[in-house]
Amino acid sequence: MKSETQKSVPFFDYKWLYREHGTNLSKIINGVMEKGAFILQGELKEFEEKLANYLNVKHAIGVGNCTDGLLLSLKSLNLQKGDEVLFPAHTFVATAAAIFHAGATPVPCEIGSDHLMDPKHLEDKITKKTKAIVPVQLNGRTANMQAIMEIAEKHDLIVVEDAAQALGSTYKGRMAGSFGVAAAFSFYPAKTLGCLGDGGAVVTNNDEIAEKVFLFRDHGRDKNGVINFWGMNSRLDNMQAAVLSYFLDHYNDTVKRRRELAAIYNKNLKGIESLVLPPYDSNEDHFDIFQNYEIEAKNRDNLKEFLGENGVGTLVQWGGKAVHQNEHLGLMSHHLPATERMVASSLLLPLNLSLADEDVTYVCDKIKEYYDAAAS
Ligand SMILES: *Cc1c(COP(=O)(O)O)cnc(C)c1O
């Protein structure tokens, strides 16, 4: 039966961008260079307006990266030392680091079967010191924001979204990033809207927060050069903004293709008992954009090795640890059994625009081959 020759399906092909878009990108970059327009110039403003329009929010502010975006959003809330901020433990350390550097205490919470913040466990973690919640819209899926916002309202907590992985994802027709008082997006190259280096944005409907973040990213300086408070330098490069405008113009196609690839995985992996597949649009409330295709796999490490031997790159996210399991961060006393169980079997399969349909079916065939052999 095994007639297929070995393919190479890298987890992420960073050089594809140049092969596919190099000519157009060179033109854009040359144009910016010719103008000498590098910092806080027209291309940045244009991208910010485009992004705000796309998300249907009032303000978008380009910043150095998403980690800074979260930090600046949280800083604008004037959190005090000892204030607790809840976040789902299945996330990049950046979520918690932003809370920490904003001067508050990060408190990790459980995830549900959708791998996102579990509203059912959230209330258990609320104390008198809790001030805010940072849900993470992971893998291109938006959390159950109705339940989370209801809990936030009931306990008078502020919500800031980590939407690094979720540009264009919706819940009940509303865009990820438009639920909380503010949200941050990442334009890291491997994100669904990636630039040629680091980049990020804060979005908000709140004028006061927008003004603060806007000043904060440029040393607290206003247009008259007055330093309004202790700020920092976290500006989205004008060149990166020009590149992002170009990709944002094609973004609907990007999302469409990602969803097609995810559908091929779903179709081919359905029914394999050793796997739990991601909750693809599991009900009409969700529209997923598939930043990642995250499966739970029996014998995860062996499967990963087998796929590697067959030319398929996969990723164990966050080094295989939920945030609280990192021994040097002081969060080890938290026990989150559902999260810990999930990260032990979690595996990301390749899902990128560089993939052909056949690449995905090849990955699926290899996964089937692995579990068939294990069963016999
Ligand atoms: C990528 C990512 C970040 C950090 O984004 P940067 O732009 O690299 O700072 C934060 N949170 C999540 C969930 C991410 O995936």
Image (cartoon, helix red, strand yellow):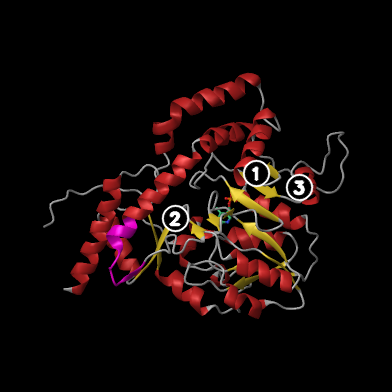
- How crowded pointer 3 is (Cα within 10 Å; few <14, some 14-19, many 20+) is rated as many
Look at 54% across and 38% down and name the residue there.
Answer: 248
- How crowded pointer 1 is (Cα within 10 Å; few <14, some 14-19, many 20+) is rated as many
Q: Quadrant of the N terminus?
A: bottom left
Is residue 332 in view from this perspective? no
Specify the amino acid type for callout 2. Asn
Mark 2, residue position: 292
Kindly indicate whether the residue at mark 2 contacts the one at mark 3 (C-beta within 8 angstroms). no
Q: Which residues are magenta?
A: 265-276
Mark 1, residue position: 64
Kindly indicate whether the residue at mark 3 contacts the one at mark 1 (C-beta within 8 angstroms). no
Which residue of the protein is positioned furthest toward the left in this rendering? 1
- How crowded pointer 2 is (Cα within 10 Å; few <14, some 14-19, many 20+) is rated as many
Mark 3, residue position: 210
Label 2 CB less than 8 angstroms from ligand 1: no
Q: Quadrant of residue 256?
A: top left
- Mark 1 and mark 3: Cα distance apart in space: 16 Å
Q: Is residue 334 left or right of residue 314?
A: right
